[in-house]
Structures are given as C-alpha cells and as structure tokens.
Amino acid sequence: MAHATDTLAHLRRALHGEGPESSDFDLSPQFRPAGRVLRPAAVLMPLIDGPNGLSVLLTKRASGLKHHPGQIAFPGGKVDATDADARAAALREAHEEVGLNPAQVTILGAMAPHETVTGFTVTPFLGHVTDPFTPVIEAGEVEEAFLVPLAHLLDPASYSIQRRRWLGQWRSYYTVPWGPYYIWGATARMLRALAARVA
C-alpha cells in the first residue's frame, strides 16, 4: 500500500464521479421486490491510521438488538428528519455509536447508494479520521469496534461469494473475513464496491 497521503488522494479520485451501484440483490436479483418504497439511510466508512497502516473501523452490533444482532456493520443508520442530509446522518450515527467527533472526520467522498434487503437505500461516506482516536462504544448498540487494514479490503482476492438458505431458497452474498470477524452481506458488498472503484 502506498504512503497514506497518496492512498487518500487516490481514494478521493476514485470516489469522484459516477460509480457502480450495489445492492443486497446483486447476486440474487430474482428476489428483489417490485415497487417498494426505500427509506434513506447512511453509513460512515471511517479510515484510521492504525498499526497496519490505513484501516477501516467496523463495529460488531450488540447481541441484544432486534435487527441484525451480532453482525459486522459500519457506524450508521436511518436519516432522521433532524439531519441536514445523509452525510450529517452518517456523522451523527458515528458519534453516537463509537464516540467519533464529526470535527475529526474529513469526508473524502460518497459512493452510490446501496439497496438493502430490509428496505433502505444506504449512502456510504468514506471519511479520514484526522486525529488519534479511541472508540467509545454505545453498549446498547455496539458490542465491539475494531480495525481492518484497508489493503485487505481493497484486494479483490480477499472476497468470496457464499450462499445460504433463507426463507426456503438459496441466496448468494459476498464475504470478506478478517481474523475472527465474519464480514458479509451489505457491509461486505459496500466494501467490494469500494474495491472495484479503487481498482
């Protein structure tokens, strides 16, 4: 991986302009419902200068949550009426979930919205955390926050396609495991879209 400054400049260029759209239905388009109304949401992909170079901060959702308990996710959530826009929602959620001060984040750009199986259109924002940062997790929502090297996530060889039975039918999805963390579904798909842009 190039020097961090060069990498950040390359990422900024990669996020400029139109990019490939992604959705939870990319590998199983036959399951996409017709005519549904999607609710806006946003996530932050926080880039942090970690011990393994530039790394992405991910969270493990609390096991007591009603939706997606224990899954790996970006800080984020639905866009509230009080949010100025999707970007503001992503920064607010990151502040609430992991204690990341929005003033510490330089947004490099956004990717095309990602449609989820749960009915959201999620805009991912890539942001560089400019100061030393130690996550302070909101225990009601987040069980753990951890770093994954950006080089691992930008390497197409890190990804595999797997499938499982859901509601009686086989559905395929991307995975990008890291150590004990099984990163899959929408999170892995958005990261795969980032890798495709950078490549």
Image (cartoon, rainbow, N blue to C red):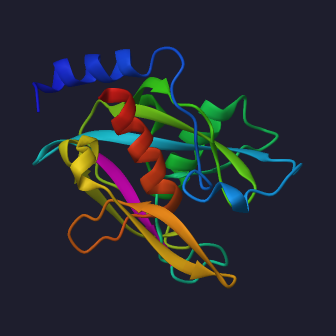
User: As rendered, which of 7 and 35 lies closer to the eye?
Assistant: 35
Image coordinates of residue 21 in percent, x first then y, are 57, 35
User: As rendered, which of 195 and 39 lies closer to the eye?
Assistant: 195
Q: Residue at x 35, y 55 (%)?
A: 135
Image coordinates of residue 100 in percent, x first then y, are 43, 45
Q: Residue at x 36, y 15 (%)?
A: 13
Q: Main secondary structure of the magenta part?
A: strand
Q: Which residue is drawn at 21% across and 24% down?
A: 7
Residue 33, quarter of picture: bottom right
User: As rendered, which of 80 and 138 lies closer to the eye?
Assistant: 80
**What residue occupies the far front of the structure in this picture?**
30
User: As rendered, which of 167 and 182 lies closer to the eye?
Assistant: 167
Residue bounds of the magenta highlight = 56-62
Q: How many labels does the image show?
A: 0
Above or below, 68 relative to 129: below
Q: Quadrant of the N terminus?
A: top left
Q: Quadrant of the C terminus?
A: top left
Q: Is residue 190 magenta?
A: no
Image coordinates of residue 38 in percent, x first then y, are 80, 47
Is residue 74 visible from the viewing direction of this image?
no
Above or below, 63 relative to 96: below
Q: Residue at x 48, y 63 (%)?
A: 173
